[in-house]
Amino acid sequence: MIKEKVAFILVGSFLILSVYGQEKTAKQNYKVDIEAFGDNSRHWYGIADKGNVINPVQGQPRYKATEITNIADNILLYQKDNGGWPKNYDMMAILTQQQKDSVINSRHLSNTTFDNGSTYTQITCLSNVYTVTHQEKYKDAALKGFSFIISSQYENGGWPQYYPLESNYSSHITYNDGAMIGIMQLLKDVAENQPEYSFIDSRFREKLKTAYNKGIACILNTQIKDNGKLTAWCQQHDEVSLKPAWARAFEPPAICNGESAGIVLFLMSIDHPRKEVVNAVRSAESWFEESRIYNTRVKVITAPVLNTKFRKSVSDRIVVTDSTASPIWTRYYEPGTHKPLFCNRDSKVVYSLAEVDRERRDGYAWYTYAPQKVIDKFPAWQKKQTGG
């Protein structure tokens, strides 16, 4: 009997050591996806925003991607009382004590957003770090972030750019910069029972699945039907009517191919999609085929430095004819006519890049190659749907 107990203890100890060894190895191998926070970091270092709680100091040091708990602790530091995160800070920055104190003292502020990859990226990182370390504080913060996502969703399934809502265009359902699709990808991973979200209990998981399904419905309901045919999506849609809406002064209601490509790639990633999703993908791919532009290239040229109240322009861009150029798309297409569309800061629509003021011409992505990714993936996706 004593021998049996000793054997059991030894086996149990071996199992504990084995599991500990696996966890230690996992922790050593896991790296934070730094580029997931890339937009935030670039904005923090590149724009001296007086509205920021803190700004970078000269030579601000940064954690390595392998220093996962230090990065996760930074993420906890920035999380607001409502569960969301602000934008345009570097999650990898090694903060001074003064910077930390300033961030802690701003937790009551509710400038929480999904813009520039905020909030859903922090939740993803915390979930991964918790899975590796099993430190409860990371799980608790991730769950609080998920609750923020549920609270901020419109009844029609969309998400605004900021929550609590602000009285400007950011209250629109926001596809711009991948905001809503970033949220949806996170919820899709939860719905598909990805292992890094196994800590979510069944009751809360069902709430997140409901939010995900409502999001799918919103995507389908906002696809623009033009001239009797489904096309693609706008960068932002009115949160009540679901129609394409204005954002910034130079961002008109239009069919927007860059953001739409991201939406379609997300829909194509769904296993066993229902027929409405299949129809949405097929219609959007047809639109991308129809709207591509041949023999055209955007060329960056040297130009005198131009200082404006918005930014400093150090180059210019022109459209040139090039028979060897890959197909390209403009960012905006005019509903009804399907003509390529451009816009100035005075909100006046123009129909060529040359008519855009220099500062905007050089400072905004008016053309995109993103739809080509959809066209390249479409044959294999189509074959999968038809059982070929």
Image (tube, helix red, strand yellow):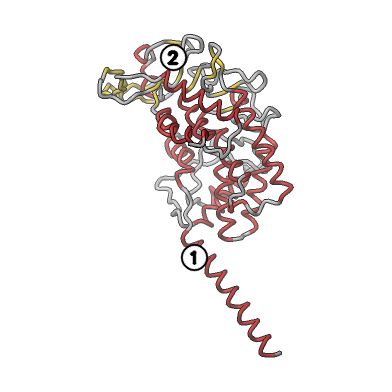
Q: Nearer the viewer, residue 33 or 95?
A: 33
Residue at image position (51%, 38%) is 88
Left or right of 170? Residue 34 is left
**Up/down of 197 relative to 118, above or below:** below
Residue closer to the observer: 99 or 46: 46
* Residue for badge 1: 25
N-terminal-most mark, 2 or 1: 1
The residue shown at (34%, 13%) is 354
Q: Residue furthest front?
A: 388
Q: Secondary structure at mark 1?
A: helix
* Residue type, numbered disc 1: Thr
Q: x, y percentage for residue 35?
A: 45, 44
Residue 359 appears in the picture as rendered: no
- The image position of residue 347, as x and y in percent, is 49, 13
Q: What amino acid is found at the position of numbered circle 2 in the picture? A: Leu
Residue 377 appears in the rendering? yes
What crowding class fits label 1: few (fewer than 14 Cα within 10 Å), some (14-19), or many (20 or more)?
few
Q: Which residue in the protein does label 2 denote?
A: 341
> Residue at 50% of width from left, 19% of height from top?
255
Q: Quadrant of residue 374?
A: top left
Report how far apart the C-alphas of labels 2 and 1 lie in the structure. Answer: 53 Å
Measuring from the top left, give residue 185's x and y in whole percent: 56, 39
What element does badge 2 sit on? strand
